[in-house]
Image (spheres, coloured by chain):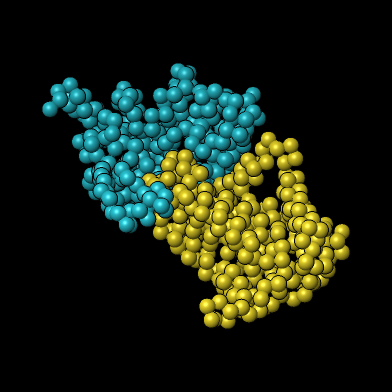
Chain colours: A yellow, B cyan
């Protein structure tokens, strides 16, 4: 483990180059280039705002554009990282077969380039918070911590999925469907309190709200982002702590899985 | 004696799965109906042992499919041995394929940095070497054009320029001299010659026996994954030629 870490430090220039490559390739030949990082969430925000304040105005949420943007940006960071990481090893088969380098840099660079995108998108978010008169409070200072927890959680998935795709090429297709379901199951464009507090399924009374938080680490992450940036209030510490522990657990499991198979990647891709 | 590379009883097995379950559906069908699992084992190397002392130029020869490239890939740590132990001391520059890792959308300049990074150098070192690399490649005028507009010869030249100027302790050369025009080939050989004089370790895989004879101190002859001979270049090549002239 220590040796891998030392190697990663040695190959940090490669990591940086791959992050830059990911960003460059994504916007190559597009007229607006990096502007898309900023425009995409704004358009998405517009779509959801039109949909839920004009077409389906049942659940009245004040300041809906900010409400949705605050959740959408972290979600896109997660979802883009996960989808891109599935092919991060298989898509670089030509490198893995020809050159030795610590394989960890492949999923790492994918997630880090999405983190860079997310950081840019946060500029848009702060701009919108000023325009839409969002609450600017001391709790914004928790943002780096939230991002760190999400990064850890995302890396766990990236390590796991990049390895799984080496052996099963339909992982990206499965994840495509799964991420759509996950998107709807996460309170992004609806407030968590529209879910029932108690619902009877097969004679068992479930607190659906609590269940969503417990089963879905993204739900409590997104909820925490929303509390600090939209409500301007301190997050629910117990959930945040539990999410942090879950995220670290995911990273450990995902990385162990990656490590278990990284030796044979050159033969299997 | 300090060895730059040592192979101790190294074997490498590849498993050729003719019906490999590549999708989840296929593997689930496999659970229900464990069909004829036609896997085939293939030993690319069997109990190969040799040592390359520091500063030696070492040739690897043998017919196609003898396991030469597998030996290089094991040295470069791209593959792991099935059994036995491969020990390598020092930084290896794997010239397994020129321009491996080049990205066609990036410019020559960007690719030089990307490729240098792939070889594990720091940003400072890459910047230090940049001018030498470009000068060696003779591609100064094209260095800011995207690589997709390069000819294959230019591509190879840039690839060799990076790999040869990163200053590895051990240089692996696999048939790379088959590319490029004659002038550039001579330049590559001169570079290898220079490495030799600097006392660096070179592992040279080639079908070009004359070049092997000229530059290698010692040679390894592989056939079907087995060591046929290892020793002084002349004697190994002589017995290799003899076996080809006199099959059976």
Estimate the x, y position of residue A242 in percent, counting from the top left: 59, 75
Q: Is residue B232 visible?
A: no
Query: Please, is residue B13 above or below residue B198 in the view?
Result: below
**Among the 4 quarters of the image, the one containing residue A229:** bottom right
Residue at (31%, 43%) from the top-left corner?
Answer: B18
Residue at (64%, 62%) from the top-left corner?
Answer: A184
**Among the 4 quarters of the image, the one containing residue A237:** bottom right
Estimate the x, y position of residue A171 in percent, counting from the top left: 49, 53
Residue reaching furthest left? Answer: B248
Estimate the x, y position of residue A49 in percent, counting from the top left: 78, 58
| Front-lying residue, B68 or B90 | B68
Residue at (26%, 29%) from the top-left corner?
Answer: B63
In the picture, the quarter occupied by the C terminus of chain B is: top left
| Left or right: B193 as drawn, with respect to A188 | left
Estimate the x, y position of residue A55 in percent, counting from the top left: 78, 58
Q: Is residue A215 visible?
A: yes
Residue at (73%, 46%) from the top-left corner?
Answer: A36
């Amino acid at each position: 483990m220590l040796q891998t870490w030392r190697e990663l430090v040695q190959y940090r220039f490669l990591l940086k180059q791959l992050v830059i490559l990911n960003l460059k390739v994504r916007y190559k030949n597009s007229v607006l280039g990096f502007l898309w990082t900023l425009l995409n969430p704004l358009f998405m925000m517009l779509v959801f705002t039109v949909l839920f304040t004009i077409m389906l105005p049942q659940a009245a949420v004040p300041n809906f554009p900010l409400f949705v943007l605050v959740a959408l940006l972290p979600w896109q960071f997660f979802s883009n990282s996960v989808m891109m990481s599935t092919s991060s090893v298989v898509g670089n088969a030509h490198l893995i077969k020809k050159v030795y380098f610590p394989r960890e840099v492949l999923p790492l660079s994918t997630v880090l380039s999405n983190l860079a995108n997310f950081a840019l998108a946060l500029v848009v978010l702060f701009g919108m918070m000023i325009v839409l008169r969002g609450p600017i409070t001391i709790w914004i200072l928790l943002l780096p911590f939230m991002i760190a927890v999400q990064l850890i959680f995302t890396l766990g998935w990236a390590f796991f999925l990049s390895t799984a795709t080496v052996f099963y090429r339909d992982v990206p297709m499965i994840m495509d469907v799964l991420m759509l379901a996950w998107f709807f199951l996460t309170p992004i464009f609806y407030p968590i309190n529209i879910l029932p507090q108690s619902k009877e399924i097969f004679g068992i009374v479930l607190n659906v709200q609590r269940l969503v938080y417990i089963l879905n680490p993204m739900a409590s992450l997104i909820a925490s982002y929303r509390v600090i940036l939209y409500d301007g209030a301190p997050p629910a510490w117990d959930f945040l702590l539990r999410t942090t522990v879950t995220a670290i657990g995911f990273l450990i499991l995902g990385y162990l899985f990656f490590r278990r198979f990284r030796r044979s990647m050159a033969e299997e891709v | 004696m300090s060895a730059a590379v040592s192979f101790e009883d190294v074997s490498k097995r590849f498993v050729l799965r003719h019906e490999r379950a590549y999708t989840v559906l296929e593997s689930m069908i496999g659970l229900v109906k464990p069909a004829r699992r036609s896997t085939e084992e293939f030993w690319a190397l069997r109990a190969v042992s040799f040592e390359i002392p520091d500063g030696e130029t070492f040739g690897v020869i043998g017919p196609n499919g003898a396991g030469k490239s597998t030996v290089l890939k094991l040295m470069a740590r791209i593959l792991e041995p099935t059994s036995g132990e491969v020990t390598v001391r020092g930084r290896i520059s794997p010239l397994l394929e020129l321009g491996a890792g080049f990205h066609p959308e990036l410019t020559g300049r960007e690719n030089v940095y990307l490729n240098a990074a792939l070889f594990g150098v720091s940003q400072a070192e890459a910047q230090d070497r940049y001018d030498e690399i470009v000068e060696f490649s003779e591609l100064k005028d094209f260095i800011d054009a995207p690589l997709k507009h390069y000819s294959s010869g230019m591509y190879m030249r840039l690839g060799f320029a990076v790999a040869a100027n990163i200053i590895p302790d051990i240089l692996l050369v696999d048939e790379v001299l088959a590319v490029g025009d004659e002038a550039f080939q001579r330049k590559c050989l001169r570079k290898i010659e220079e490495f030799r004089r600097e006392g660096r370790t070179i592992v040279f895989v080639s079908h070009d026996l004359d070049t092997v004879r000229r530059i290698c101190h010692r040679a390894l002859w592989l056939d079907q994954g087995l060591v046929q001979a290892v020793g002084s270049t002349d004697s190994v090549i002589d017995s290799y030629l003899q076996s080809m002239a006199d099959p059976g």
